[in-house]
Image: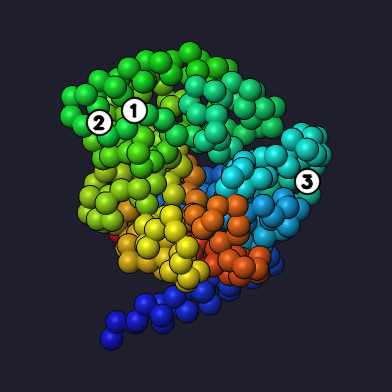
Amino acid sequence: MTPSPIQRRAALEQLGLAIAAASLASNSAASLQANETVSQQSAPRHLLSSSLFGYSNLSDILPIAKRLGIQAIDVWPKVHGNQREQLTEMGEAKFAELLASHECKLECLTQYPLGPFGLGEEMRLAKRLGCGTIVTGSGGPKGLTGEELKQSLRQWAEKMKPHLELAQQCDVTIAIENHANSLLDSPDSIRWFQDFRPSERLAIAFAPYHLPQDEAMLSALIGDVLPSIEVFYAWQHGKGCMQAQPKEDEQLQLPGRGNLDFAPLLAQLKKGSYCRWTEVFMHPFPRGVPIAERLDQVTELLAASKAYVDQTWNSASTN
């Protein structure tokens, strides 16, 4: 008998809490070392988005990261979060001390406000803090198709070259999210992006949310562009995130809660020995609030979804 969605979610939540509790008891140094190398037999390398917590303090978020067994954080600015502003306010030295005290590293800076051509100072900051990834959007033009889209992507990639030279100097990869209403927003654009990217310092932040919710299409697309993927968002469309709705409907964006089966997607990543970042993700409405009313509820949701991703990855067939 197939479990109902409610039974599945309840089981996932219990499994997630058990895993989170077990990770507390584990040796954090061993966990950090285990995350350094990802093979077909191990779990994904998880990245925790600060935007999931709204405008919560980093001092409250980092202990949760540790409870979840995640040693890498993705710091967002307003309006989705304000942790990037918190970094500026406390200063780089104090920020680094705070991370170290919770055995966490800054591994990603998400910076949509700056865009792909305005990341110079952010890349220099990333170098100082040992952060290797910056996520942003492609910008426009939008709504292009066919040859016009192809040529626009080729021109965009050419324009990125001097910025990628700085990325190389700073040891940073710029990951562009496939985002609705942007140049990089369709399966064709994602494939052409890989064809035209002039450097491995330019990559994709792959967001299933913004693509048709078709497991076969998504897994095939992942297989086509896997060498370009720097961040994989474990994020589905569910009922969307652009209007007010009950929290339980909003949370259908999380893996394991909505209808999208992540097994084919994760199997494709595993088959290709994907070893970059995986980020359980969703957007709340309005932006700037946590994904649940209380931080303990946020922790439970993330523990369950992380457990779903890990369990699905581990059981995925690569044949």
For badge 1, the amino acid type reads Pro
Report helix, strand or loop for mark 1. loop
The picture places residue 103, in percent across and down from the top left corner, at 72, 49
The picture places residue 123, in percent across and down from the top left corner, at 60, 25
Disc 3 crowd, CA 10 A, few/some/many (<14, 14-19, 20+): some
Q: Is residue 34 above or below residue 223?
A: below
For badge 3, the amino acid type reads Leu
Q: Which residue is mark 2?
A: 144
Nearer to us in this view, 77 or 192: 77
Would residue 244 be found to the left or right of residue 128 on screen? left
Q: Residue furthest bottom?
A: 1
Report helix, strand or loop for mark 3. helix
Disc 1 crowd, CA 10 A, few/some/many (<14, 14-19, 20+): few
Q: CA distance from mark 1 to mark 3?
A: 40 Å
The answer to whether the residues at label 2 and label 1 have Cβ atoms under 8 Å apart is: yes
- Residue drawn 67% across the image and 52% down it: 55
> Which quadrant holds the N terminus?
bottom left
For badge 2, the amino acid type reads Leu
Q: Which residue is mark 3?
A: 98
- First in sequence: mark 3 vs mark 2: 3
Q: Is residue 27 above or below residue 221?
A: below
- Residue drawn 50% across the image and 22% down it: 117
Q: Is residue 266 above or below residue 191?
A: below
Q: Residue furthest left?
A: 146
The answer to which image quadrant residue 302 occupies is bottom right
In the image, which disc is placed on residue 141? 1
Q: How many marks?
A: 3
In the image, which disc is placed on residue 181? none
Q: Is residue 17 above or below residue 212?
A: below
Disc 2 crowd, CA 10 A, few/some/many (<14, 14-19, 20+): some
Would residue 216 be found to the left or right of residue 229 on screen? left
